[in-house]
C-alpha cells in the first residue's frame, strides 16, 4: 500500500504540473520592487491596489526579503499604495492592460512614525496553512517579550514551565530565523523571555506541519522571523525587566539583555547577551484515600527555587554575490539552579500513625552549546533555490540530590540517600533542500536529511549507613541511547485560474534507535520506516479572496524518548515515584481539518485527530508495596479528539484593539489499566483575550485574560486555571525608550488541583506558586549610519518557505 500511495502522489505531481503550464487565460500580473533612497530593499511592506471604478475591490500582497512583490488581478485602473513603518506611503495610479513590471519604487523615510498605520494594521491574517501574526504592525508588541507574544498568537498555549501546544496538542517545534530551537522546558521560556517583541517582525503559527517538516512535529510549527537592521554601522538595544510578588517577595525576577548588529560591506555580524535571575517559593498539599482499607495519608510540601540563566549568541552572514551566501552561528546557554524541598506526611492505618519529615537539597548544572553553518544559492528569478544546513548541539546536565527522611510513630528510623545523575547529549543534523519553481504559480520542493542523536547517562544511587555511602544497585543505572533518522520529502504546490490553491506532499522517514541499559529489563530496538502524506486545498469563496474554505490532512509520528523508555524510578515524594516503560511504542496521528476564513483574518477551524498508541501517564499502586504509587509512561490503544478553534483579531475602534483565541475539544481516551480497557470522555476549553487601548499617541493600556478548563491526561485530571494581567506602556525620547509597568495575576490565582484515581486509591494534589506581582520593563534602542540591512544566518532544520514547502 505504501508503494501504491507513493506512485499515486508522483502521478499527481506530474499531472498537476502539466495542468499549471496550460493556464494561459489568466488575470494580468503587476510586479515591482520597493527600495529606499539608498537602493536597499524594503521587505515586508504592505502593498494594496484599489480599483478606481469600485473601491470595494481591493487586491494586495507583502514584499519579500528583496522588496519585490507580485499581485494578480483583472485588467483595469487601480491606485497603488505601499506602506511600511518609518516611511512615507508610496502612492501612484496604474492602468493594467497586460502584465506590468514597475521596477524600483522608492520610499522616503518619514519624519515621524506612522502611528495611524500601527493602530489600524491587522495583527493576525490567515494564509492557506498558517496564521501570520504581524508583530511589527501592532501596538501590542512594545514592552513585551517573545513568550508573551506567543501567548497572544492564535491557538498557542505556553506555560512558565515551558509546556507548549497549538490547539491543545503538544509536540510543537519553535524556529527562530530558520533555526530550530533545541531548548526545552524552562530553558525555552528563558530564551523567549530574552527575545524582545520589538525585535520580532512576524510570528507564523502552522497548526498542521506539512511534509517539509519533521514527522514528529505533531503539534505543528511556530516560526519567528526577526527584524533586519536598516542602519549602517552599529545598531542595537539594551533592556531590563524586573518583577516581584507583592507579598513577602515569594517570587522575583530580573532580566538584563543586550542586542548588537553590525554590517561592513558584504559581511553582517550580530550578537545577543542575556541574563535572568529568579527566586521562587511554592508547594503542594497531597491527600491520599485508600478505599479498600482503613488508611489515609496527608502531606504538605514546601519548595524554594533559585536559578540563574545566561545566554550568548554570535552569528555572521557573508554574501559571496547576489545569488550566494554563507553563514555561521554559535549559541551558548548556562543554567545552574538550586531547589530546597521540605515536607511532612502523616499516614494513619487501623488507628496507628506514622509521621515522616523529609528534607531534599538539589543542585543542577545545565549547559548547551550549538553551532550552525549554511550555504544557500538562488538559481533563478522565479524563486528556485538550493540550500544546505549543518547543525551540531551538545547538551550537558549534572545533578546532585540529597534526600533525608525521619519516620516516627509505628516505626522509628531515619533514611538518608543521594542521587547524582549525569547526562550528556550529542545531536548532529545535516539537510539539503532543492526548491524548483515550475512556473509563476507552481513549485516543487524536495529535500533530504540525516539526524543522529546520542545520549550517555549515569544514575548512581547511594544510601548512608554507618557513616559511609553504600551503592544501591536496584536504584542505580547506566544508560546509553543512539537514534538515527533518515528522511526524504517532496512537496508540490500550485494555484489554479480561480485562485484555488493545492498542496500535496509526501515524507518518508527511517528510524533506527538503540537503547542500552544495565537494567534487567530489555528496552527493545526501534527500527521502522513510515510514509507521512499531507494535503491542503484552499478554495476562495469570492473574487477578493477575503473568504475561503481550507481542507487539510496530515499524518504524524510520536517517537518515545529515552526517558520515556527508561525503566528506572525517580523519587517524587515519600510515597510516589515516576518511571518509564521499555515497551513503549511509537504513536501515529491522522489529522483532518476544515477551516473557514472570513475577511482574511477571522477563522473557524473544525478538526479531528485519531491517535493510535498515544502516550499518556498512568498512575497505579506498586504491586510490591500498596503504599507506594507509580506514575508510568504508557500507550493508550486509541485517542479521538474533536475540536473547534476560533480566532478573532478585531479593531473595535481606532483606539481599541482586541485579539481573542478560543479552543474547545471533546477527547475520547481508551487506556489500559492493569490490562483492563477503560474509556474516558472529557470536554475541555482554552481561551485567551487581549485588549489594547491607545491614548495620547504614545501611551497604551493593556488587559489580558487566560482560562483553561479541567483536562485529562491518562488517568490524571488537572483542574481549571485562570489569570488576568494588566499593563501601562509609554514611548519616550522619539520612541527610542519604551517603558512598561504591569500587574501580573491580578486576582492572585495561586495554583491548580490535580487528582487521579486508580483501583481503590484516590489522590488529590493542591499546587500553589503563582502570585500577584508588579513588574517594570525598560528598553532603549540606538543606531547610527546609512540605510543598509543585516541578515541573520539560516540555522534551520526547517525552511522558511510558505505553504508550498521548503526545507526540513
Image (cartoon, rainbow, N blue to C red):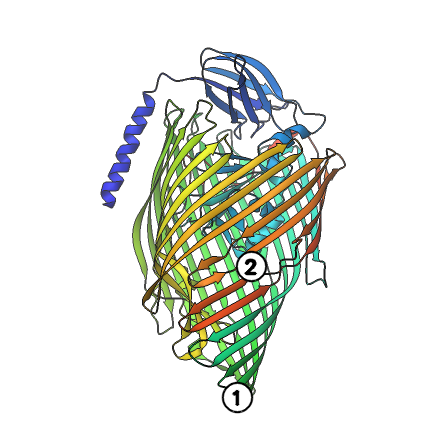
Residue 423: x, y in percent?
Answer: 48, 65
Looking at the image, residue 789 sits to the left or right of residue 701; the answer is: left
- The quadrant in which the C terminus is found is top left
- The quadrant in which the N terminus is found is top left
Cα distance in 3D space between marks 1 and 2: 45 Å
**Residue under circle 2?**
367
Give the residue at x 71% y 44%.
728
In terms of sequence position, does the residue under pointer 1 or pointer 2 come before the other?
2
Looking at the image, residue 615 sits to the left or right of residue 409; the answer is: left
**Residue under circle 1?**
410
Give the residue at x 40% y 69%.
567
Q: Is residue 206 above or below residue 365?
A: above
Give the residue at x 25% y 37%.
8
- Select label 1 or label 2 by which is in front: 1
Residue 480: x, y in percent?
Answer: 41, 65
Residue 69's label in the rendered image is none
- Judge by depth and name the residue closer to the eye, 126 or 227: 126
Q: Is residue 112 above or below residue 484?
A: above
Amino acid at each position: 500500500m505504501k508503494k501504491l500511495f507513493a506512485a499515486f502522489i508522483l502521478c499527481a505531481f506530474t499531472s498537476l504540473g502539466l495542468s499549471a503550464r496550460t493556464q494561459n487565460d489568466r488575470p494580468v500580473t503587476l510586479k515591482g520592487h520597493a527600495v529606499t533612497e539608498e537602493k536597499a530593499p524594503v521587505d515586508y511592506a504592505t502593498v494594496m491596489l484599489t480599483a478606481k471604478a469600485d473601491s470595494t475591490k481591493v487586491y494586495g500582497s507583502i514584499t519579500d526579503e528583496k522588496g519585490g512583490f507580485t499581485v494578480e488581478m483583472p485588467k483595469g485602473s487601480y491606485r497603488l499604495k505601499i506602506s511600511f513603518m518609518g516611511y512615507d506611503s508610496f502612492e501612484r495610479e496604474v492602468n493594467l492592460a497586460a502584465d506590468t513590471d514597475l521596477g524600483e519604487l522608492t520610499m522616503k523615510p518619514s519624519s515621524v512614525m506612522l502611528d495611524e498605520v500601527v493602530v489600524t494594521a491587522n495583527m493576525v491574517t490567515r494564509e492557506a496553512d498558517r496564521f501570520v501574526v504581524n508583530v511589527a504592525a501592532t501596538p501590542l508588541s512594545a514592552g513585551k517579550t517573545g513568550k508573551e507574544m506567543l501567548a497572544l498568537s492564535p491557538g498557542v498555549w505556553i506555560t512558565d514551565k515551558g509546556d507548549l501546544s497549538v490547539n491543545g496538542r503538544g509536540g510543537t517545534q519553535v524556529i527562530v530565523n530558520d533555526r530550530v530551537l533545541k531548548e526545552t522546558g524552562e530553558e525555552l521560556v528563558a530564551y523567549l523571555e530574552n527575545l524582545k517583541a520589538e525585535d520580532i517582525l512576524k510570528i507564523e503559527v502552522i497548526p498542521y506541519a506539512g511534509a517539509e517538516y519533521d514527522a514528529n512535529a505533531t503539534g505543528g510549527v511556530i516560526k519567528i522571523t526577526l527584524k533586519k537592521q536598516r542602519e549602517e554601522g552599529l545598531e542595537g538595544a539594551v533592556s531590563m525587566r524586573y518583577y516581584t510578588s507583592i507579598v513577602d517577595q515569594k517570587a522575583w525576577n530580573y532580566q538584563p539583555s543586550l542586542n548588537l548588529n553590525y554590517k561592513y560591506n558584504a559581511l553582517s555580524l550580530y550578537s545577543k547577551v542575556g541574563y535572568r535571575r529568579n527566586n521562587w517559593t511554592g508547594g503542594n498539599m497531597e491527600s491520599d484515600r485508600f478505599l479498600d482499607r482503613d488508611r489515609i495519608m496527608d502531606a504538605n510540601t514546601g519548595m524554594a527555587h533559585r536559578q540563574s540563566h545566561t545566554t550568548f549568541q554570535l552569528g555572521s552572514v557573508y554574501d559571496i554575490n547576489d545569488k550566494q551566501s554563507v553563514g555561521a552561528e554559535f549559541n551558548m546557554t548556562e543554567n545552574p539552579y538550586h531547589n530546597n524541598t521540605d515536607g511532612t506526611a502523616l499516614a494513619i492505618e487501623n488507628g496507628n500513625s506514622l509521621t515522616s519529615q523529609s528534607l531534599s537539597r538539589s543542585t543542577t548544572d545545565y549547559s548547551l552549546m550549538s553551532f550552525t553553518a549554511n550555504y544557500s544559492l538562488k538559481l533563478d528569478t522565479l524563486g528556485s533555490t538550493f540550500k544546505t544546513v549543518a547543525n551540531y548541539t551538545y547538551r550537558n546536565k549534572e545533578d546532585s540530590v540529597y534526600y533525608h527522611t525521619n519516620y516516627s510513630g509505628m516505626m522509628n528510623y531515619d533514611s538518608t540517600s543521594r542521587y547524582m545523575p549525569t547526562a550528556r547529549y550529542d545531536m548532529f543534523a545535516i539537510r539539503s533542500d532543492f526548491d524548483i519553481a515550475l512556473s509563476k504559480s507552481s513549485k516543487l520542493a524536495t529535500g533530504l536529511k540525516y539526524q543522529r542523536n546520542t545520549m550517555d547517562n549515569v544514575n548512581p544511587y547511594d544510601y548512608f549507613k554507618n557513616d559511609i555511602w553504600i551503592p544501591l544497585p536496584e536504584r542505580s543505572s547506566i544508560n546509553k541511547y543512539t537514534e538515527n533518522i533518515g528522511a526524504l520529502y517532496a512537496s508540490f504546490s500550485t494555484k489554479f485560474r480561480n485562485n484555488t490553491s493545492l498542496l500535496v506532499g509526501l515524507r518518508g522517514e527511517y528510524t533506527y534507535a538503540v537503547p542500552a541499559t544495565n537494567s534487567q529489563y530489555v528496552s527493545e530496538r526501534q527500527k521502522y520506516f513510515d510514509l507521512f502524506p499531507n494535503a491542503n486545498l484552499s478554495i476562495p469563496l469570492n473574487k477578493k479572496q477575503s473568504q475561503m474554505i481550507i481542507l487539510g490532512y496530515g499524518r504524524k509520528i510520536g517517537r518515545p524518548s529515552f526517558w520515556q523508555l527508561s525503566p528506572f524510578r525517580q523519587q517524587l515524594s515519600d510515597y510516589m515515584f515516576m518511571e518509564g516503560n521499555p515497551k513503549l511504542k511509537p504513536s501515529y496521528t491522522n489529522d483532518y481539518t476544515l477551516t473557514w476564513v472570513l475577511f482574511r483574518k477571522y477563522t473557524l477551524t473544525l478538526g479531528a485527530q485519531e491517535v493510535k498508541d498515544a502516550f499518556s501517564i498512568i498512575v497505579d499502586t506498586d504491586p510490591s508495596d500498596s503504599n507506594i504509587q507509580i506514575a508510568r509512561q504508557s500507550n493508550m490503544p486509541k485517542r479521538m479528539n474533536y475540536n473547534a478553534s476560533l480566532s478573532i483579531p478585531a479593531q473595535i475602534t481606532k483606539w481599541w484593539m482586541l485579539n481573542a483565541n478560543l479552543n474547545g475539544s471533546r477527547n475520547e481516551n481508551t487506556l489500559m489499566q492493569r490490562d483492563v480497557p477503560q474509556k474516558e470522555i472529557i470536554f475541555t476549553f482554552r481561551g485567551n483575550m487581549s485588549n489594547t487601548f491607545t491614548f495620547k499617541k504614545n501611551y497604551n493600556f493593556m488587559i489580558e485574560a487566560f482560562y483553561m478548563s479541567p483536562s485529562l491526561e491518562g488517568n490524571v485530571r488537572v483542574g481549571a486555571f485562570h489569570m488576568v494581567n494588566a499593563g501601562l506602556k509609554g514611548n519616550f525620547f522619539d520612541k527610542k525608550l519604551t517603558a512598561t509597568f504591569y500587574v501580573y495575576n491580578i486576582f492572585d490565582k495561586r495554583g491548580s488541583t490535580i487528582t487521579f484515581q486508580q483501583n481503590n486509591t484516590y489522590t488529590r494534589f493542591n499546587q500553589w506558586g503563582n502570585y500577584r506581582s508588579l513588574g517594570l520593563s525598560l528598553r532603549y534602542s540606538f543606531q547610527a549610519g546609512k540605510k543598509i540591512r543585516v541578515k541573520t544566518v539560516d540555522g534551520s532544520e526547517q525552511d522558511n518557505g510558505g505553504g508550498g514547502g521548503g526545507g526540513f
